[in-house]
């Protein structure tokens, strides 16, 4: 039983509602690490060891890792203990993130709902770890695609699935293999999860899944007002022309580029798409407008949005 501010709570049967789980982990934050360690929780260390095993040797100082489901920093500490320095943590619970930031484990730790698209740029990370999180998400959500978007081609995705939940995820994960979104690197046998917790013990174990992100034929580019129009025009063109990074690694041109923007950024999105079309790099396949509702605390407002899909000629 988890020792929360609302009393002791069973956790094995938690649902996939973000609001319910935010409350559960906010209420549990101050006792979280004490409880899970008492239950024999070693999955952060096992996943960090897997990351060390599969990541390029000698790149730990610059290898950028997104630790999704950071909690109070338990998994982040396991990753940094393996020598990785560029680690960012995200979690649904603001209270756990407060503790993680106080402990200064991550370069940055912030609140994020993984049932929604992530705010990070395409190819921003070399690896992503997702430990003890998939239980609280639905297979038909956007997370698997978002993993492959924010992690570079050739980068690692390391996640855990409970043995009583994994079958629901298999069809989509296998389809992503067939589609070339990722390739399977390793899937472990069932391992102890919370062996000293009677809810789990030998009844519910956990499996570590390791994938390597495949070549990307399509990319999403989110435009904001933080950078100028010229930056986004140059970026859009580079996706169709191919690029080379500072280490000499070449990225092939993409076949499809989707450019999206909100509010004042719409003009920049249109300018970037138009510039690519004018230079004969692509054709505009579709243009969609919408007025999504944006929540800011207690205030909600609608904002104009645009999504332009470009296809390489």
Image (spheres, helix red, strand yellow):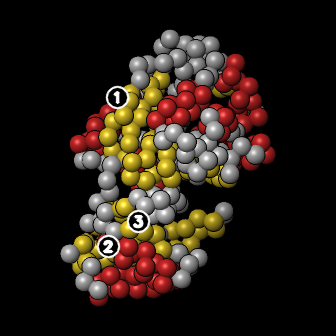
**Total residue callouts:** 3
Q: In this view, does 101 lie to the left or right of 273?
A: right
- Is residue 165 at all visible to an observer of this figure? yes
- Closer mark to the observer between disc 2 and disc 3: 3
Seen at 43% across and 79% down, the residue is: 234
Q: Name the residue under label 3.
A: 244
Q: Residues within 10 Å of mark 2 (few under 14, many from 20)?
A: some
**Picture coordinates of residue 294, whole percent (x, y):** 55, 67
Q: Residue 167 carries which label?
A: 1
Q: Distance between the residues labelled 2 and 3?
A: 10 Å
Q: Which residue lies furthest to the left in this view?
A: 313
Seen at 50% across and 58% down, the residue is: 124
Q: For residue 80, which quarter of the picture? A: top right
Relative to residue 211, is residue 259 depicted above or below?
below
- Secondary structure category for the residue under label 1: helix
**Picture coordinates of residue 60, whole percent (x, y):** 58, 44
- Is residue 141 at all visible to an observer of this figure? no
Seen at 47% across and 59% down, the residue is: 247
- Secondary structure category for the residue under label 3: strand
Q: Which mark is residue 223?
A: none
Q: Which of 159 and 13 is in front in this view?
A: 159
- Closer mark to the observer between disc 3 and disc 1: 3
Relative to residue 4, is residue 242 depicted above or below?
below
Q: Residues within 10 Å of mark 1 (few under 14, many from 20)?
A: few
Q: In which quarter of the image is the N terminus?
A: top right
Seen at 43% across and 19% down, the residue is: 190
Q: Residue 241 carries which label?
A: 2
Q: Distance between the residues labelled 3 and 1?
A: 39 Å
């Amino acid at each position: 039983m988890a020792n929360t501010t609302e009393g002791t709570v069973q956790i094995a049967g938690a649902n996939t509602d973000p609001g319910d789980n935010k409350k559960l982990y906010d209420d549990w934050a101050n006792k979280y690490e004490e409880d899970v360690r008492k239950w024999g929780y070693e999955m952060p260390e096992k996943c960090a060891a897997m990351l060390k095993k599969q990541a390029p040797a000698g790149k730990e100082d610059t290898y950028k890792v997104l630790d999704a489901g950071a909690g109070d920093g338990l998994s982040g500490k396991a990753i940094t203990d393996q020598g990785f320095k560029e680690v960012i943590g995200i979690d649904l619970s603001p209270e756990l993130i407060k503790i993680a930031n106080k402990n200064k484990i991550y370069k940055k730790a912030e609140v994020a709902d993984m049932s929604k698209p992530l705010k990070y740029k395409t190819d921003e990370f070399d690896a992503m770890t997702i430990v003890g999180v998939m239980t609280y998400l639905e297979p038909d959500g956007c997370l698997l695609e978002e993993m492959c978007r924010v992690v570079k081609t050739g980068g690692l995705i390391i996640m855990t699935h409970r043995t009583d939940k994994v079958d629901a995820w298999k069809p989509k994960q296998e389809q992503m293999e067939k589609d070339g979104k990722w390739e399977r690197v390793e899937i472990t046998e069932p391992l102890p999860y919370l062996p000293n917790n009677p809810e789990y013990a030998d009844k519910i174990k956990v499996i570590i899944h390791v994938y390597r992100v495949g070549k990307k034929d399509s990319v999403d580019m989110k435009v904001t007002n933080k950078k100028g129009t010229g930056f986004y025009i140059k970026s859009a063109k580079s996706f169709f022309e191919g690029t080379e990074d500072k280490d000499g690694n070449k990225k092939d041109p993409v076949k499809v580029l989707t450019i999206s923007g909100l509010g004042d950024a719409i003009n920049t999105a249109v300018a970037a798409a138009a510039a690519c079309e004018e230079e004969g790099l692509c054709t505009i396949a579709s243009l969609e407008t919408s007025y999504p509702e944006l929540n800011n605390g207690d205030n909600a407002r609608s904002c104009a949005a645009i999504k332009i899909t470009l296809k390489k000629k």
